[in-house]
Amino acid sequence: MAKNGTPRRRAKSAEHASAAIQDSVGAGVLPRGVTWTRRHLLDLDDFSFAEIALVLDTADAMKEVLAREVPRVPALRGTTIVTLFYEDSTRTRSSFELAGKVLGADVINISAKGSSVEKGESLIDTVLTLQAIGTQILVMRHHASGAPYLAARNASFRVVNAGDGWHAHPTQALLDAYTIRSRIGDLRGRRVVIVGDIAHSRVARSNTWGLTALGAEVVLCAPPTLLPMGLDGACKHDGEERNLPAVRIEPNLDRAVEGADVVMALRLQKERQASGLLPSTREYARLYQVTAERLARAKPGAFVMHPGPMNEGIEISSDVAHGMHSLIEEQVANGVAVRMAVLYLMMRGTKPDS
């Protein structure tokens, strides 16, 4: 039989798509001399330009697979991926699940609600249980900063941080960088403005590391009460000085967006007003909402981004969020390709050193 959708046709298409990934990874498309050597993906704070470029270039091959008539490849057949989410999520969780299934992996979804966690099981006990059932990659979101690091220290499998507290969200930063690069090319010398609740945003933290590693100029804009301490280039932790990425702080949004290539708004969590960090959401919207008038101060054709979910009319106006320069839906779509790249590199890249 020669009809579309027959098992023979599907198998042939899958083999072809799998070969496309192998060809792209092995035929010089990726940076020469760069291999994946990491066991876990916990943050981007120590990633080099070449390592981030490796993920983004691999995502190009994955996006080609997603565009095929049959977007399935057996690259991770036989691999067990578990998503463990202690917080609700739509975009991140669904894109990781789809990424694993497109690559042929077995994906198991676990929520803290209704699991043994509600019965008092510790994180380490949960990790050991997942290890015992044969988990090979754990994709984990947790409300406590540092939880994925604890899991990684106590597990034999690989751990991907899908967001931990206020600390980090590395795959969101990777997909943001991929989205920007796909539109404006090389990020070196490009100006990216991140506006909103910087202090409590794991997205802002990981993006700051990732974008500066790629050579972008990052401008952070927020009320003083929503800016973290230690953004002067260095900070001390347990008596040890640690370098922070070089960023520019500009509390006035009208000045911050001048000459910007990309403006990224962050979700304003309503509890910030209740905690006294803001006088009111109306005041915040007046001073920090990304509007068409403010966007006009940026470079002609500047793009707008938002990690979602959005509070339209507070951090971003509806006409800008859904306008011709918005990359917000594109960010969501690119999340699948980037997370496919991460999962693929973790299992099929060069054997990790640790």
Image: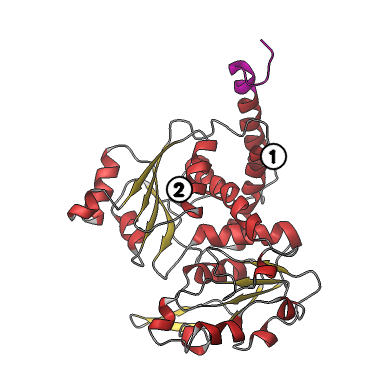
- At a point 43% along the width and 31% down the height, the residue shown is 78
Q: Where is residue 344 in the image (x, y as percent from the top left)?
A: 53, 42
Q: Name the residue under label 1.
A: 27
For mark 1, does the 10 Å Cα neighbourhood hold few (<14), some (14 to 19), or many (20 or more) residues? few
Q: Position of residue 236 (x, y in %)?
A: 40, 83
Helix, strand or loop at label 2? It is: loop
Colouring scheme, one of rainbow, by chain, secondary structure, one colour: secondary structure
- Front-most of residues 339 and 274: 274
Mark closest to the chain's N terminus, 1 or 2? 1
Q: Is residue 14 left or right of residue 101?
A: right
**Amino acid type, callout 1:** Ala
For the view shown, which residue lies furthest in the right direction?
A: 300
Q: How far apart are marks 1 and 2 (CA)?
A: 21 Å
Q: Name the residue under label 2.
A: 352
For mark 2, does the 10 Å Cα neighbourhood hold few (<14), some (14 to 19), or many (20 or more) residues? few
Question: Is residue 241 part of the magenta span, yes or no?
Answer: no
Helix, strand or loop at label 1? It is: loop
Q: Give the range drawn in magenta.
A: 1-12
Picture quadrant where residue 315 is located? bottom right
**Amino acid type, callout 2:** Pro
Q: Position of residue 69 (x, y in %)?
A: 67, 31
Question: Is residue 4 part of the magenta span, yes or no?
Answer: yes
* Above or below, comparing residue 138 to residue 170 in the picture: above
Q: Where is residue 162 in the image (x, y as percent from the top left)?
A: 44, 57
User: Would you say the residues marked 1 and 2 are in contact, meaning their CB atoms lie under 8 Å apart?
Assistant: no
Q: In this view, does 95 lie to the left or right of 66?
A: left
